[in-house]
Image (tube, rainbow, N blue to C red):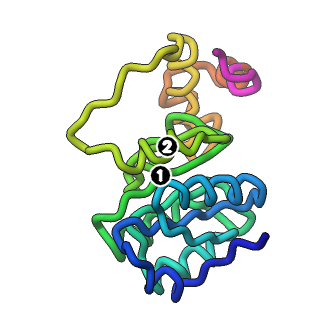
Amino acid sequence: MELNVTADTVAIAPSPERTLLIVEDDKSFVLRLARAMEARGFVVAVAETVAEGLQLVEQAPPAYAVVDMRLTDGNGLDVISALKRRRPDARGIVLTGYGNIATAVNAVKLGAVDYLAKPADADDVVAALLQHESRKPEPPENPMSADRVRWEHIQRIYELCGRNVSETARRLNMHRRTLQRILAKRAPK
């Protein structure tokens, strides 16, 4: 079953406040998510690339968006940014399997209201999209360890320095080889 909903379909939707754009290149995941979101009352449009997502945003900016971070033709944050320019009241969330704090901070700065790890449950997606800004989120069941927080901080500075090891080491007041060893390891739990 092909899920290609055009902007025209979204424009004549009975409830424009429940329009949702999903930009995702994993076909099986997007099919499941689209069905689940339709069952929850959303009128869903699907794009598989950043270019398709930008085109749908230009034609008929939806009230909500769920965007994968890494797509075949670029960064899904471009879709979030374009959506916020066209429709400032829109609420978008970013999905990714490659998460770190630096990316989450960047997503929020560009207008995303939340950042979820894939594969995300449809209930989590709905909760993130419909959560009121004034309501504080519940504290996490399993918060990050101090080692993980340190690793995330190093990753953030590394990204901000354009992935330049020498510059990152200088800014963190750390020996370059020590930093290289930390970057070569997997993220702590």
Residue 157 percent location from the top left of the image: 51, 35
Q: Which residue corresponds to mark 1? A: 93
| Quadrant in which residue 76 is drawn | bottom right
Q: Residues within 10 Å of mark 1 (few under 14, many from 20)?
A: many
Q: Residue furthest top?
A: 146
Nearer to the camera, 30 or 39? 39
Give neighbour class at mark 2: few <14, some 14-19, many 20+ (Cα, 10 Å). many
Question: Picture coordinates of residue 81 (x, y %)?
Answer: 43, 65
* Amino acid at the residue labelled 1: Ile
Taking the spot 50% from the left edge, 46% from the top edge, the residue there is 125
Q: Say which residue appears at 64% left-offset and 15% top-offset.
A: 189
**Residue nearest the viewer, comparing 105 with 21:** 21
- Residue 103 higher or lower than 40, as above or below: above
Is 8 placed left or right of 75 in the picture? left
Q: CA distance from mark 2 to mark 1?
A: 6 Å
**Residue range of the region highlighted in magenta in the rendering:** 182-189
In the displayed structure, 100 sits above or below 21; it is above
Residue where numbered disc 2 is placed:
115
In the displayed structure, 35 sits above or below 184; it is below
